[in-house]
Image: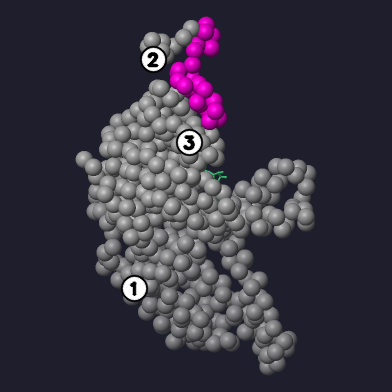
Amino acid sequence: MSGMINSLYNLRLLDDLAKKGTSIHRVHPLIKLLTTVVYLTVVVSFGRYQISGLMPFLFYPVLIFALGEVPVLPILKRIIIVEPLIIGIGILNPIFDHQTFMFGGFTVSMGWVTFLSIMIKCALTVTVALLLVATTGMDGLAAAMRMLKIPKAFVLQLVLTYRYIAVLLEEAARTLRAYSLRAPGQRGIHRSAWGTLAGQLLLRTFDRAERVYQGMCLKGFTGEYYTGKSNRIRIIDLFFLAGWISFFVIARIYNIPMLLGSLLTGVLN
Amino acid sequence: MSHHKLEAKELHFTYPDGNKAVNGISFMVSHGEAVGIIGANGAGKSTLLMLLMGVIFPQKGEVIVGDVHVTKKTLSMIRQRLGMVFQDPDDQLFMTTVYDDVAFGPRNYKLEEKEVEERVLKALELVGILHLKDRSPYKLSGGEKRAAAIASVLSMQPDVLIMDEPTAALDPKSRRRVIQLLKSFKHTKIITSHDLDMILEICERILVIKEGEIVADGETREILSNAELLDSCGLEMPFSLQDCPLCGSQKQSLKKLNS
Ligand SMILES: Nc1ncnc2c1ncn2[C@@H]1O[C@H](COP(=O)(O)OP(=O)(O)OP(=O)(O)O)[C@@H](O)[C@H]1O
Ligand SMILES: [Mg+2]
């Protein structure tokens, strides 16, 4: 149960990471948002059977991890949380897709290829989205979305939902702590208390979220986020955007690993 | 200067679950006055402050700030002039760093970032937590959080400062600092607290609330030395007015009052 309470601290990890000041963090939020959107679109646009073509797209997250000083393990953990969902979606592919191909002497269903491709795409997209939050912060993102003229109501919804998750988990941790202190030597929560605890939790988080929102309103919050960071897009930001977009497009059109491979074999021959 | 006047007229508020928390409260606070609101747990102090701020609206009665009635329409104007520190600092800190939290208000009023920075640093300095500016609010101790919450309101430079138990959970030094700070703040103040010694130092006037009604409204020393009244409201005379517990000698201040 203390694990649950500890994870509270991890929950705000993305916020903490976003406070760093690396070269990646200094890139304008709007630029990072656009780059990420292009990345996601391009990765998702790959066909069901293409796997090798996806490999160059590892390059972007790896570079952000390194330059943005983002620790790899905590992010991986978060991806693993999402993967079961994807497995649920993709697991039927090997059953329904009856095409087969030979791989090292085995007959393999094409379904496994599509399954693998879905898993890779999912891992890539989730990683890049998490990296965006970890190097920009939710407030920076909200500001960027407002610059793109995305409606206030929508951005506000997103930001408050993000805050709400933190509030929910904090309340959960408190409730659990209170419970475990008065139920020593018990593992987990007894069945008889589930209903009350869940109900309590819901009511308390509503209450708390309401009060936090009121606190924001009292300080003049009208739905617009001001991060206080400079709003100007620098030349280097534009290079960042142009560079990555051209890389993504080229990697989409040409299968770089295949080209490299044939180049190598050509040289060897 | 009538524009910092604050008036409550016949306020009634019942929570949705039928809990009658405020039951016909009227009072007026004039410019520059420091008013303490005291009463037992559950007397309705926090609810009253929420009504003043327009966080909740009374079922009957009205609040008037300056010459403006507090309604949904005038709310944003009213809130520029009133600053409130909540009872629970967790409700007031929601950004990722203390600095951003304190800067949240000024930024919402679209001040230049230069001016925002000045205000933030000044506010943090005033409450003595400049060294915490880059920390995450949720990782602070209870008292540090409270100091941060106070700073986040000071940075908005309100005309009227409303505080719900500002010294709860503070260590003696920080408590002293907050008291000094409040004393140096020349504008209108409305403070609720169970720390009657603090109220005695800061406020010249006290409202005593019991079960949602005002039972006494008067000069601080008079009310705080009225043991009977305090006792009937679940309160106790502040230590600084009690007779010495060691030798039993009567307090100088009381002697003066009684003579
Ligand atoms: N959200 C709520 N829903 C229903 N009833 C409430 C709610 N909040 C407070 N109350 C009730 O309203 C009454 C007044 O509460 P309030 O919080 O104003 O007391 P208080 O004077 O601030 O007490 P304390 O000194 O403990 O802070 C109490 O009886 C309380 O039970
Ligand atoms: Mg209260």
Q: Nearer the viewer, mark 1 or mark 3?
A: 3
* Ligand 1 within 8 Å, label 3 CB: yes
Q: Is residue B244 magenta?
A: yes
Residue A79 visible at all? yes
Q: Is residue A40 above or below residue B138?
A: below
Q: Is mark 1 within 8 Å of ligand 1?
A: no
Amino acid type at image mark 3: Ile
Sequence order check: which comes first, mark 2 or mark 3? 3
In percent of width and height, residue B27 lies at 37, 39
Q: Secondary structure at mark 1?
A: loop
Q: Is residue A141 above or below residue A208?
A: below
Residue B150 lies in what quarter of the image?
A: top left
Q: Secondary structure at mark 2?
A: helix
Residue at screen point 27% across, 38% down = B31
Q: Start and end of the magenta stretch?
A: B225-248
Residue A47 lies in quadrant: bottom right
Q: Amino acid at mark 2?
A: Leu
Does A192 lie within the magenta span? no
Q: Residues within 10 Å of mark 1 (few under 14, many from 20)?
A: few
Q: Residues within 10 Å of mark 2 (few under 14, many from 20)?
A: few
In the rendered image, the vertical position of residue A209 relative to residue B205, given as above or below = below
Q: Disc 1 to disc 3, how far (Cα)? A: 49 Å
* Nearer the observer, B198 or A221: B198
The CA distance from mark 2 to mark 1 is 66 Å
Q: Which residue is mark 3?
A: B209
Q: Report the residue marked by disc 1.
A: A149
Circle 2 is placed at which residue position? B257
